[in-house]
Amino acid sequence: MDDKRDPAAVVADTTPVTQAQFKQIIDTLKKLEKEITTSSKETAESVARRIKREKNGYEFKKKAAKIEETEGDLKKLPVIEATKQTLDNAKDLLQQGLLSLAKRQKHFKMADCSEQGWAVVQEYPADALADDSDDEKKIEKAEKASKRKAA
């Protein structure tokens, strides 16, 4: 057998094979890296699209009630006359308008989720905007009161 071959000759014989194997490994790793990068980009884009959809994605069950209530509320928003108001006053009015819209949106969701609809919103304390466990108790209390009045 060739047990007594020159080590330099063995290295010279195996070097092209080893280099070819390393090249295959590197090519495979590059393909995997590209797949992972593509996959992670697609996942990130998918999550971003889903977040945008969910952010504004509350779907009302009772569409007619939503439209009727919205039309009345739009008339209540403060109107800004740019020529007469200072920038600070305009900012304050915008902030009040945003708070009013957030409150109405909460009421829409309450009415939409409840069997009693807007009766629950009417029983709900008008100044409560807290989104904590006390708020949930207040909503339940308002729903029970509206059920009692309906019965």
Image: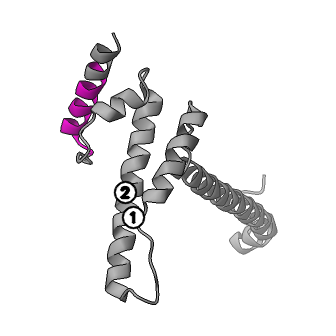
Residue type marked 1: Gly
Q: Residue at x 46, y 81 (%)?
A: 81
**Quarter location, residue 144:** top left
Q: Which residue is mark 2?
A: 100
User: What span is colored magenta in the figure?
Assistant: 131-144
Q: Residue at x 57, y 38 (%)?
A: 59
Residue highlighted by disc 1: 97
Report helix, strand or loop for mark 1: helix
Task: Assess disc 2: are there few (<14), some (14-19) or many (≥20) residues with their C-alpha within 10 Å of its C-alpha.
Answer: some
Q: Position of residue 118 (x, y in %)?
A: 41, 31
**Which picture quadrant has residue 49?**
bottom right
Give whichever of 7, 55 is nearer the camera.
Answer: 55
- Number of numbered discs present? 2
Between 15 and 103, which is closer to the camera in this rendering? 103
In the image, residue 29 lies at what x, y percent? Answer: 69, 61
Residue toward you, 89 or 47: 89
